[in-house]
Image: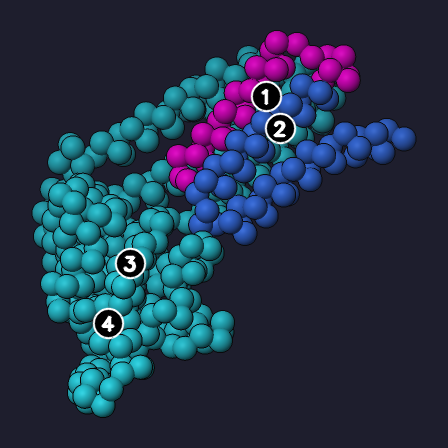
Amino acid sequence: MQVLSNTISHLILPGYSNNQKAKLLHTESILALIILLFFGQILINHFPYLGANVLGYASQISTDEIVRLTNEKRSNDGDVQVAYSPLLSAAAKAKGEDMLAKGYWAHVAPDGTQPWKFFSNVGYKYKYAGENLAKDFPSAQAAVDAWMASPSHKDNLLSTKYDEIGVAVVEGNLNGVDTTIIVQLFGKRYDTSIASATTDASAKTISEDANQTLTIKTTPVPSPTPLITANQITGSDISNNSEKTSGSPTPFQILISPFSTKKGFSFTSTSILLITFTVDAVFLARRKVARVGGRTVAHVLFLSMVLIAIILIQSGDLLPPIGDTIK
Amino acid sequence: MKEKYLITHYLPLIVVMVAAVFGFYIFAYDKALKMSLVIASGASYFVWGLIHHFIHKDLSWEVAFEYLIICLFGVYAILILV
């Protein structure tokens, strides 16, 4: 017990044994922390290759919410709202599943498949098409906020070229990591665009098409079922709008979130340093010990900034948006 | 007098750190900008340390290394999350 107490005070309190500076604050200790973080990160990144089931981010994201938020942003900007298109949602779902099946995080598949192929596969003939991709966001609001914060995604989201939207939230194993991918597709039908300036004959066709569109619009938006959460991945719930293709983990698999684990490492190590520096400063001030070295106040300021930044950083990744026009 | 002297020394560092925190908040989803912010704030802290100790005439390799290692730790702790 005495040994443990001495060791702890040697680590966090300035004294005779550590040359009046907590051992944790010695440069070699901080260097060891950096090395620990480095190897911890490597270990987390290589968990999938060790057979562990790694959870990128599982969250409750509904497609309905994404459509609602998108239209809310468009309304706020004075733009026309986009109509929900089951066809575009089917294309979005096919795109998401293709990304999981082929293991890519990009607009274009490794085999060269363009995103527009998924539009044509479901029979959606477009004049304008656009795609926004996001992954590992904790909520629909966070994803839409991220798109709005990025000027190029914002342009896609608010573009008046589009009048229909389709969204899919697909969950599955992407290169060994359980990931939630949001595929947001925008489109304007080719037929509809011709309709605005044509003859009666074509107007009739358009009218039929408009009826079809009306039918589509009035089709109830599938009530999005929340995705499986991190602690619910038991293979029990798979919604219409989401797919979990990796299957349920066996009891022998480890479920970890790389981002949350790394955040935990960073937060803990920074907090330990910050607390130790503060305790060190208080003890030095009380004992009135003069010490050659860096300014503790400066270190505390810098580490406080680091800690706040770590807390502020959220998970989520975006790809630059992409669009296509048929002339 | 001493307090005023202290504040003028620490003020630039405080401003840089507060600006970095605001930057992280405002550009939460801009990966490149966040990386630039953390590297810039780390570099600022390191350079501030060198200048501060140079003015105080107590700059040594040990002190410079202390700032460098804490700077590396902070920058790395954030960069692995960006």
* Residue ID for mark 3: A324
Instruction: Report helix, strand or loop for mark 3.
Output: strand
- Mark 4: amino acid: Tyr
Residue placed farthest to the top in the image? B61
Asked whether the residues under the numbered discs 1 and 3 touch, taking CB atoms below 8 Å apart as contact, a structural biologist would say: no
* Residue ID for mark 2: B45
Asked whether the residues under the numbered discs 2 and 1 touch, taking CB atoms below 8 Å apart as contact, a structural biologist would say: yes
Distance CA(mark 4)–CA(mark 1): 61 Å
* Residue ID for mark 4: A190
Pointer 3 or 4: first along the chain: 4
Dominant secondary-structure state across the stretch colored magenta: helix
Instruction: Name the mark on residue A88.
Output: none
Q: Nearer the viewer, residue A38 or A322?
A: A322
Distance CA(mark 1)–CA(mark 3): 51 Å
Where residue A235 sits: x, y (%)? 12, 58
**Label 2 CA crowd tier, 10 Å (few <14, some 14–19, many 20+):** many
* Colour displayed for chain B in the image of the structure: blue
Distance CA(mark 3)–CA(mark 4): 12 Å
- Mark 3: amino acid: Asp
Residue B16 shown left or right of residue A198 in the figure: right
Instruction: Report helix, strand or loop for mark 2.
Output: helix
- Residue A126 sits in quarter: bottom left
Residue A327 shown left or right of residue A14 in the figure: left
* Residue ID for mark 1: B67
**Label 1 CA crowd tier, 10 Å (few <14, some 14–19, many 20+):** many
Distance CA(mark 3)–CA(mark 2): 46 Å
**What are the residue bounds of the magenta stretch?**
B53-82
Image quadrant containing the N terminus of chain A: top left
Pointer 2 or 1: first along the chain: 2
Asked whether the residues under the numbered discs 3 and 4 touch, taking CB atoms below 8 Å apart as contact, a structural biologist would say: no
* Colour displayed for chain A in the image of the structure: cyan
Q: Chain of mark 1?
A: B
